Image: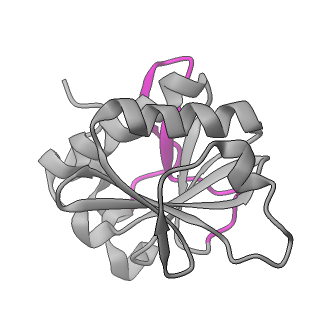
Amino acid sequence: MADLLWEDVKGFFDPDLMGSLPDVLVPETSMEDWQAVLDLVGASGWMCQYSEGETVLPVPRAEAVLSRLADAECPELRVWPTADVLAIFRFYSVEEIDFDVDLRELQGQERLDMFCGFLTAIGRRLGKPVVVYSEGGAYSHPVLGFDVENDQVVLLAEPLVR
């Protein structure tokens, strides 16, 4: 059974309402959590590409990425959970894992199920919530996310009706 039904959540996936690139966060993380995500990506079979600026490099250890110089360009890890859905992880800080997805790629029940599975895989690996906010939205107003206690993706706000 699906974590969420498309008809109930499609407003949260409307780029005109939410912005096309919502913010996805795992709060209160550590270097070990970042490494666990890198290990998950490597073990999952998901296609990925790590880059620093325009330079594509092998995926390093989390410690190497997160100990870069303060004025260095922020590295990115592009992860494709499926061939046509991209998540972009940015290594801003040790304390939170931050990534974006493009809502235009997440339309319909099949894509929603895949996205919920992606959030669940990360949340289970870390034993932590994975929370989705509107693009540039307030972190006090999450819309949905992986709930560790319930072991599924749940709504964290009232559905948007359009």
Please state, as top left, top right, bottom left or bottom right, where the N terminus lies in the image: top left
Is 10 positioned to the left or the right of 1 in the image?
right
Give how far across and how far down residue 45 sits, in percent.
Answer: 27, 37
Q: Main secondary structure of the magenta part?
A: loop
In the picture as drawn, the residue positioned furthest to the right comes out as 70
- Residue 153 in view (yes/no): no
How is colour applied across the structure in the image? one colour
Q: Image quarter for residue 116?
A: top left
Give how far across and how far down residue 91 sits, in percent.
Answer: 66, 59
Q: Relative to 83, is 118 above or below?
A: above
Q: Nearer the viewer, residue 60 or 128?
A: 60
Q: Residue at x 66, y 33 (%)?
A: 33
Magenta residue span: 137-162
Is 52 positioned to the left or the right of 66 in the image?
left
Is residue 28 shown in magenta? no
Is 138 positioned to the left or the right of 84 in the image?
right
Q: Nearer the viewer, residue 26 or 2?
A: 26
Q: Relative to 24, is 130 above or below?
A: above
Q: Relative to 54, is 102 above or below?
A: above
Q: Image quarter for residue 43?
A: top left
Give how far across and how far down residue 7 sits, in percent.
Answer: 20, 51
Q: Relative to 70, is 131 above or below?
A: above
Is 158 positioned to the left or the right of 142 in the image?
left
Q: Residue at x 15, y 47 (%)?
A: 109
Q: Residue at x 55, y 40 (%)?
A: 130
Please state, as top left, top right, bottom left or bottom right, where the C terminus lies in the image: bottom left
Is residue 138 shown in magenta? yes
Q: Residue at x 52, y 40 (%)?
A: 38
Give how far across and how far down residue 157 sits, in percent.
Answer: 52, 50
Q: Nearer the viewer, residue 137 or 121?
A: 121
- Residue 142 in view (yes/no): yes
